[in-house]
Image (spheres, rainbow, N blue to C red):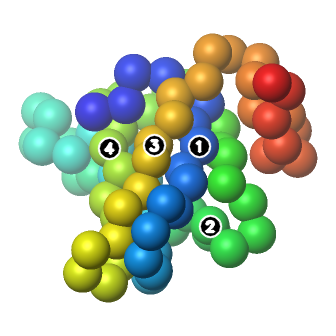
Amino acid sequence: MLSRDEIGIQVEKGNLEHLFLVCDANVFDVAPTRVTLRFNDRQAWKVNPEWDHCNILALGSPGTVIQIWEYPAGTVTETCGLLL
């Protein structure tokens, strides 16, 4: 489960085919919010702070390795760049 609202994804090896953000899954019988994250044109996102219990669902070819980064507030810019 993600603990911050600003995240980044880096593919270290393999081929990432689909990337989803799934929030509120199985919490008080609320239907989950699922958002497709477009990872080809960016690698950082701001998650809606009103969404809770968010997880990343990554689907790729066998052996694919990704890193998930959680950044402090204010690290991801409005254009989804990073202020590092």
Mark pair 2, 4: CA separation: 16 Å
Asked whether, in this view, residue 33 is left or right of residue 32, the answer is right
N-term-proximal mark, 1 vs 3 = 1
The N terminus lies in quadrant: top left
Tell me the distance, in whole angstroms, between the alpha carbons under discs 2 and 3: 12 Å
- Amino acid type, label 3: Ile
The residue tagged 3 is: 68
Q: Nearer the viewer, mark 3 or mark 4?
A: 3
Mark 1, residues whose alpha carbon is within 10 Å: few (<14), some, or many (≥20)? some
Residue 29: numbered disc: none
Q: Mark 2 highlights which residue?
A: 39
Which element type, helix, strand or loop, lies under badge 4?
A: strand
Name the residue tied to disc 1.
8
Please tell me which of labels 2 and 1 falls first in the chain: 1
Mark 2 vs mark 4: in front: 2
Q: Amino acid at mark 4?
A: Asn
Q: Is 78 drawn above or below residue 35 in the view shown?
A: above
Q: Secondary structure at mark 3?
A: strand
Mark-to-mark CA distance, 4 and 1: 13 Å
Q: Residue at x 52, y 28 (%)?
A: 70
Q: Residues within 10 Å of mark 3 (few under 14, many from 20)?
A: some
